Image: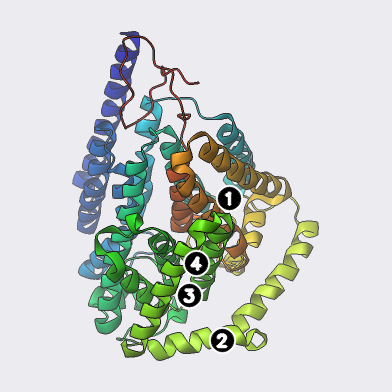
Amino acid sequence: MRANAAGGNSVAAVLIVGLLLIVSMGAIAITTTQPGLHLQIFLLLLFFLPAIILAFANSRHLLVYILCVWAFGPEVRRIVDWAQGEYQPMALLSLAPFLATTVLLIPIALHPAPLAPPLRKALLFFGLAIGYGTIIGAARNGLSFVFDFGNYVLPFLLALYGAKRYPDTAERDRWIASLSTIAVIVSIYGWFQYLTMPAWDAFWMRHSGLTSIGWPYPMRFRVFSTLNAPVQAGVFLAAALGPMLLNRRWRGRFGWVGVVLVASVLGITLVRTSWLTLTVFLTAYLLAVPLRQSWRVVGAVACAGILVFAVMPFLPGNQAVTTRLQSLTNLREDKSYTGRLAIAAELTREIVRNPVGNGIGGSGLTVTRFSDKNKAALNIDNGFYLIYLDFGLPGTLAFFYGIWLMMAAIRESSRALPKLSEHGRVARAAMVASVLSLASAHFFLGVSGVMVWFFVGSAVATMPARVRVAPRSVNPQPGMVQSGTSLS
């Protein structure tokens, strides 16, 4: 009875906070003299309220909805900018993914089941790294610190949410299958974008300053679909395509047609990092899978490769993809590759020169948005370097030790819950691929971080293999694990 009362009080408290937030945003909308801001606040509420409802309903669709906001939110923002005739580098709508993800705190707080010790230890070291970066960044970096802090911390909530859920394999399969379906929709729009270049996407390209992705005309740019940039689109599609190749349960409603669609648009993003990351992911998974299952995976990957290579010559943009692939065979002449080698060499000097680091928000794209222009040089295409600048030497060591401990926590979860072992292999492969790909980009920040921690969340769980049920009690149902459950 006391537990129920406490739960009811928690729900009431969060409801009150939610209502106060809505009223506050409504008051801002009413009192502001900027009509464009009214629309943005209304749309922000439209993104936020379904997440609140799903959170209080303890719905299994909450995580899927959050993935949708990360995938489609940037496109909604571009349409609004175009409709209003004004490009806004940091529009209010850009907060939609952050607000939706923050809602995960509700089910996490209302169902405080204890985390497994290996997972707690991993989260402790991540917390130490982020805490250190927060102390330095809050003092030095102003508003850019707030933005990057959200990009680091909020994706972690997906892993924490998954760890609090009952280990229902079917539910976790639905999460991954839903990611595949979202990726197919992103791919369909990607082809539409590539062939027609909608006015709102062209408007964004002209005003955003990303001249490196091409020209705002059909088939003369690198596809970014509904995401913020080709790199984000490539990472998102590669993350979805990996599981689609591994298991038919994870291909969603579109099956092999979806696989070909996602693979084709991944190609015309022309993001080599995402292609290599997918290759590393599949290799890491194959090395972990039992030999009797590896042939099935190799066969699925081979079938997908044959289909893609059979279809690709007939698709628009195939010449650009071929040229991009050929560049991998002549890396000495590749400016991007030689530039990254120079950055890696610079990292060793930076460790000696600046062991404290710049703090969270002191490097990357947010510097160009929020800080003075002389820091723009810190927008670096090297994840190792960016992590070091954000966390300094102490925080960087804690961060990578946290990754090592998280790999161990996933392995322990798979041993305790054999039915999640396949999900565990996917999560470990995703983490290996993300760490190795740090040589090219930051894979633990923003939408890339969402993908990594999504797979971790699908693989870890608080419940052990056997549940000791008290007399006259019922078996726990799928959903959030209750704190009062006795575990063995």
Instruction: For marks 3 and 2, give the CA distance.
Output: 12 Å
User: For this rendering, which residue is in front, 87 or 289?
Assistant: 289
- Label of residue 28 in the image: none
Please report whichever mark, 3 or 2, sits nearer to the chain's N-terminal start: 3
Quarter of the view holding residue 213 = bottom left
Please report whichever mark, 1 or 3, sits nearer to the chain's N-terminal start: 3
- Identify residue for label 3: 271
Measured from the top left, where is residue 77 in percent x and y?
Answer: 29, 62
Q: What residue type is labelled 3?
A: Val
Instruction: For marks 1 and 3, give the CA distance.
Output: 26 Å
Measured from the top left, where is residue 218 in percent x and y?
Answer: 29, 86
Q: Which amino acid does label 1 sit on?
A: Ile
Q: Are marks 4 and 2 in contact (CB under 8 Å)?
A: no
Measured from the top left, where is residue 132 in percent x and y?
Answer: 64, 42
Instruction: For marks 4 and 3, give the CA distance.
Output: 11 Å
- Left or right: 331, with 205 as reference point: right
Instruction: For marks 4 and 2, give the CA distance.
Output: 18 Å
Please report whichever mark, 4 or 2, sits nearer to the chain's N-terminal start: 4
Q: Which of marks 1 and 4 is in front?
A: 4
User: For this rendering, which residue is in front, 454 or 354?
Assistant: 454
Q: Which of marks 2 and 1 is in front?
A: 2
User: For this rendering, which residue is in front, 215 or 442?
Assistant: 442
Q: Which amino acid does label 4 sit on?
A: Leu
- Left or right: 2, with 140 as reference point: left
Q: Which residue is drawn at 51% across and 29% down?
A: 115
- Identify residue for label 4: 278
Q: Residue at x 30, y 54 (%)?
A: 178
Instruction: For marks 1 and 4, give the CA distance.
Output: 28 Å
Q: In this view, does 428 lie above or below 438?
A: above
- Identify residue for label 1: 360
